[in-house]
Image (spheres, grey):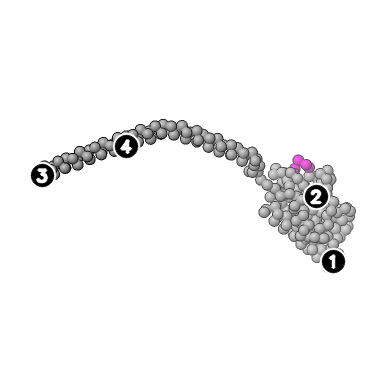
Amino acid sequence: MKKNKNRNGGTQTKMKANVKKTVTAIGAAGLIFLTACGNELPEDELVNNGQAFEMQKITDDLQASNFPFQNQEEFVTLTKLKESVKELLGDKYWPEVGLTKEELEQKTGITENMYVDFLAEKQVLDSHIDTMIIIHAKEAHVGDVEQALEQYRADIIEQNQNYPQNLCKAEASRMETIEDYVCFVQLGADTTIVADKGEDEIIAYCQEENERALYVLEKEILE
């Protein structure tokens, strides 16, 4: 019985050894197979990675070409600014004739090299002085445009000393710089509704209309 036990035990040990050899052999074969596959995979992966890199590069190039100005600053159009003012003031917006760049220079001294764009409107008759001027100034010339419009305002006040209602509008006029936009507003439309209350009331009335216009301009430009 003891021998049988030893024999059985020896058989079990031998079987275990055989199993280990078999497992080892299978493992080695598997390792060889995986190694062989591994030698092939990097080449495939390299090709795939290279294709992916090229596709990403093409995508990036296309995105860059489709949006060449994506980093450039966007500007509000002067026409939109005018329409916003007109929408607010309604029939109290009286300027109706646009100035050419030559007329703008003649009246204000603002030359073409000072601005990116401009919008200037006045009434048809020179005896009526409702005016709105918006200059999108070049950064280096914002100060020059401001000085030119300040002088323009002073000239209008001087020219209308003998015309009380126009003088009130001129004195109520406002110039304000919002970013690179230099805005001059000389509005008020029909001032006869407050004419009997004196010059101070006319000026206050026109100032209120100018403030309303500047409020809209500032809102549109800064949004």
Assign the C terminus to one quadrant of the image. Answer: bottom right
Q: Which mark, by number, is residue 120?
A: 2
Q: Residue type at mark 1? A: Ile
The mark nearer the N terminus, 2 or 1, is: 2
Label 1 and label 3: CA atoms lie apart by: 132 Å
Label 3 and label 2: CA atoms lie apart by: 120 Å
Query: Disc 3 designates what residue?
Result: 2
Rendered image quadrant of residue 169 = bottom right
Q: Residue type at mark 4? A: Gly
| SS label for mark 1 | helix
Which of pointers 1 and 3 indicates the residue nearer the eye? 3
The span shown in magenta is 111-115
What residue do we see at 10% from left, 44% from top? 2
Query: Disc 4 designates what residue?
Result: 27
Label 4 and label 1: CA atoms lie apart by: 104 Å
Q: Residues within 10 Å of mark 2 (few under 14, many from 20)?
A: many
Rendered image quadrant of residue 204 = bottom right
Residue closer to the observer: 31 or 193: 31
Residue closer to the observer: 5 or 221: 5
Q: Residue furthest left?
A: 2
Label 3 and label 4: CA atoms lie apart by: 37 Å
Query: Disc 1 designates what residue?
Result: 193
Which of pointers 3 and 4 indicates the residue nearer the eye? 3
**Residue 82: x percent and y percent?**
77, 53
Q: Residue type at mark 3? A: Lys
The mark nearer the N terminus, 3 or 4, is: 3
- On screen, residue 180 versus residue 203, left or right, reads left
What residue do we see at 63% from left, 43% from top? 71
